[in-house]
Amino acid sequence: MEKQLNIGFLTTYSGRWPQEVPNQRNREYGDWLEANLPKLHVVRADVLGCGKAEVAAITRQFKEAEVDVIVMVYGAFTGDDISTYLSEMLKVPIILWAPYEVPFQKDDRLYSNALCAMTMNSAALRRVGVKCHTVYGSWDDERAARKVKSLLMAYHTVKCLKHTQLGLLGYRPTAFYNCAFDESLIRRVFGVKIEETDLKVVFDKMDALLKEAYEADMAKMEQEFDTSRVPEGHLENHSKLYLALKDVMAEQGYDFGTLKCWPEMGNLHTTPCAVLGRLADEGINIGCEGDVDAELAQMAEFYLTGQPSFITDMINIDEKENVMTFWHCGNAAPSLCNPKYPVSMCNHPLAGQGTAFYGALKPGKVTAARFCNLGGEYKLFLLWGEAVDMDRYTKGIMANIRVEKPVREIIEQIIEEGVPHHYSLVWADVADELKEVCGLLGIQVIEA
């Protein structure tokens, strides 16, 4: 599981402090990390961090476990020797977490003094040239909990990106220069590795499929969706492409992909919108129109949530309702559709050369993002809002998102910044996590 983030967790205190609070915090905070970050691997120190021998043993344990980041919780006041030693020996980021103070009693001693210890330790780390993160607040404080989760999921996402293989299935469509990309810059900034498979490989695999395989898939689609408006021959092409793309992605070892979905595919009556939606529901994310930078945002959203997202255009605004309309030809995962309204598989809504889903997307919190190569430097365009309950009012797939900032200001900002026209929408609030990812990668955020 090389993509899984390994968290080294320890609780510390100085020897002259009572152990009751450190022991309690060691149990509570270790349990909290495991319960709230199930996708990550928590390596709990075998002993409390106190003396030199204990810290040396923890360091050996963490090194053997190949921890990627350390979470150090203050059980009680701790000198700066432990945090500096761990940072120097393990060379990984460290999060210093100071819970709130144990309630004071007038004639009793201080039992924790964690805030003081954290400020002392962070200053010491800065002196020796180590950047650390600090969190103040107990596990049940929403601000502290949110910060810890956002930081650790950001580190997880960055690690995943560095172990990601992106497959190019063709380059980009004709006259879509916005979808051009800089492979070396992507490798340098994100660590993503890119390889290419020609569309002819996909077409050849479609032709080589056994009839019983694609006919079984056709029957499945006819049972699950209204396909009455799919032209003759298009459903066969749909099922062939669906099976071929699954095979190519697996054979090539691609974690994600982008696809040149026209004009060649349209010329063969196999425009792939509905295929891409189905694959997204199976965890196979392939960005349409060869847009690698939009796919980078989809990757980050998937690593944060494990959910499918929707690569889309923004086509309209309603200033009165402060709503933005996001639409695309029909490539959304069916699981994202609003069950209140019908979902059908139809011909492509514009070109009429393949299959697409027609439907309205579900209500809920939405984060829209896109990485943008602007002047040879990556920035992240970031927008969040609430998808409203509304049926589609044109062919294809659409979502109407209500936002806080005036929509006309957002449009002007997009144009002023030079943000290209595709966005990846995920039905989750991951704006904080994406900002943390950008902080780790040194990427500026354009917040709408």
Image (tube, grey):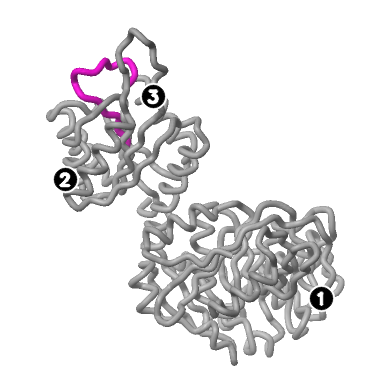
Q: Is residue 222 visible?
A: no
Secondary structure type for disc 3: loop
Badge 1, how many Cα within 10 Å: few under 14, some, many 20+?
some
In the depicted view, which residue is nearer to us: 131 or 179? Answer: 131
Which quadrant of the figure has residue 214?
bottom right
Residue 92 % position (x, y): 26, 49
Secondary structure type for disc 2: helix
Instruction: Name the amino acid type tagged 2.
Output: Met
Q: Earlier in the sequence, mark 3 or mark 2?
A: 2
Q: Residue furthest right?
A: 228
Q: Is residue 146 above or below residue 309?
A: above
Q: Earlier in the sequence, mark 3 or mark 1?
A: 3
Q: List the residue tagged with mark 1.
A: 230
In the depicted view, which residue is nearer to us: 297 or 382? Answer: 382
Asked if disc 3 and disc 2 are in contact, CB closer than 8 Å, the reply is no
Which quadrant of the figure has residue 240?
bottom right
Residue 89: give its label. Answer: 2
Does residue 22 appear to the left or right of 126 in the view shown?
A: right
In the depicted view, which residue is nearer to us: 378 or 195? Answer: 378
Badge 2, how many Cα within 10 Å: few under 14, some, many 20+?
few
Does residue 192 appear to the left or right of 445 in the view shown?
A: left
Closer to us: mark 3 or mark 2?
3
Q: Give the extent of the magenta segment.
A: 9-21
